[in-house]
Image (tube, rainbow, N blue to C red):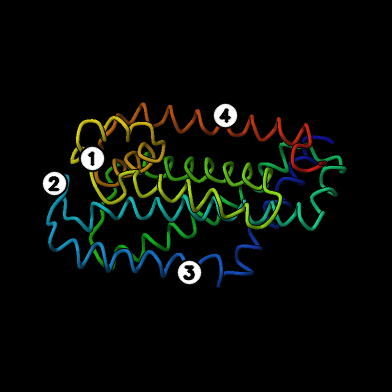
Amino acid sequence: MSVREQLVALLTLARKEYQRVLRIWVQTIVPPAITMTLYFVIFGTLIGRRIGQMGGFDYMAYIAPGLIMMSVITNSYGNVVSSFFSAKYNRHLEEMLVSPMPNWTIILGHVLGGVVRGLIVGAIVTIVALFFTRLRVDNVFIALSVVFLTAVVFSLGGLLNAIFARKFDDVSIIPSFVLAPLTYLGGVFYSVSLLPEFAQKASLLNPILYMVNAFRYGVLGVSDIDIGLAYAIILAFVLGLFGIAMLLIDRGVGIRE
């Protein structure tokens, strides 16, 4: 395939994924918006009044970037894992694999769909947050780049989950038992400086901590971790997960078995 044909294939697949998100918007967009609204009401309004300030900010403002990032993480991951596994389960993924499309276009096409859903839901949650607190963006570039790269990371993670999944139950194992705990322990609702020293060191092993704090730095200008290190870790995950996805698809792991 020529470069132009590869680009057309990529954009066509990305468009299909994007249209899928909008076609079933009642499932893909509305539920996370409602869930995040409940988080703001319960944690921000009811519990936040008792906590007061955190990191020099009103508690509601402090957790808002974390909740936005949580919605981006869960929705970018969930979109790709469900879409790619459905393509594999219904066996129309095989049609793409035997076509002249290079494997990287298949990966990026699905990833772009996950990124689109993650960013749409993230934007909606941001709008919801503005009803509860005032947010100022301290650094637009950091905020936008971190949220985009994070959506890419978890879209690739969802793709890997779908590759190894053999049945529909396998699709929910990682989000329930790995992704959810890491997200809740990733500094969404608190500053890691409040934890005991051993817990702070353990938290540094959680990659979501770096993503949440980098985004919080872009929005509020405060962070528990070094921003340069956060970018390095996020980019390492992007490159590493993409390389693993390419290797697995090239070898037909979970697809031709």
Q: Which of marks 3 and 1 is in front?
A: 3
Alpha carbons under labels 3 and 1: distance apart: 30 Å
When the figure is inspected, residue 24 is found, relative to residue 257, above or below; the finding is below
Q: Which of marks 1 and 2 is nearer the N terminus?
A: 2
Residue annotated with mark 1: 222
Alpha carbons under labels 3 and 2: distance apart: 32 Å
Per the image, label 2 sits on a secondary structure element best described as: loop
Residue 250 position in % (x across, y down): 77, 32
Q: Which of marks 3 and 1 is nearer the N terminus?
A: 3
Alpha carbons under labels 3 and 4: distance apart: 31 Å
Residue 37 position in % (x across, y down): 35, 68
| Three-letter amino acid code at the position of disc 1 | Val
| Three-letter amino acid code at the position of disc 2 | Gly
Residue at image position (24%, 39%) is: 192
Q: Check disc 3: other Cα within 10 Å, few if <14, some if 14-19, many if 20+.
A: few
Q: Nearer the viewer, residue 8 or 215?
A: 215
| Three-letter amino acid code at the position of disc 4 | Gly
Left or right: 7 in relation to 91: left
Residue annotated with mark 4: 240
Q: Nearer the viewer, mark 4 or mark 2?
A: 4
Residue annotated with mark 2: 56
Per the image, label 3 sits on a secondary structure element best described as: helix
The quadrant of the image that shows the N terminus is top right
| Three-letter amino acid code at the position of disc 3 | Pro
Residue 28 position in % (x across, y down): 55, 65
Per the image, label 1 sits on a secondary structure element best described as: loop
CB-based contact (under 8 Å), mark 3 and mark 1: no
Alpha carbons under labels 1 and 2: distance apart: 9 Å
Residue at image position (86%, 40%) is: 100
The part of the image, by quadrant, that contains residue 34 is bottom left
- Disc sitting over residue 31 in the figure: 3
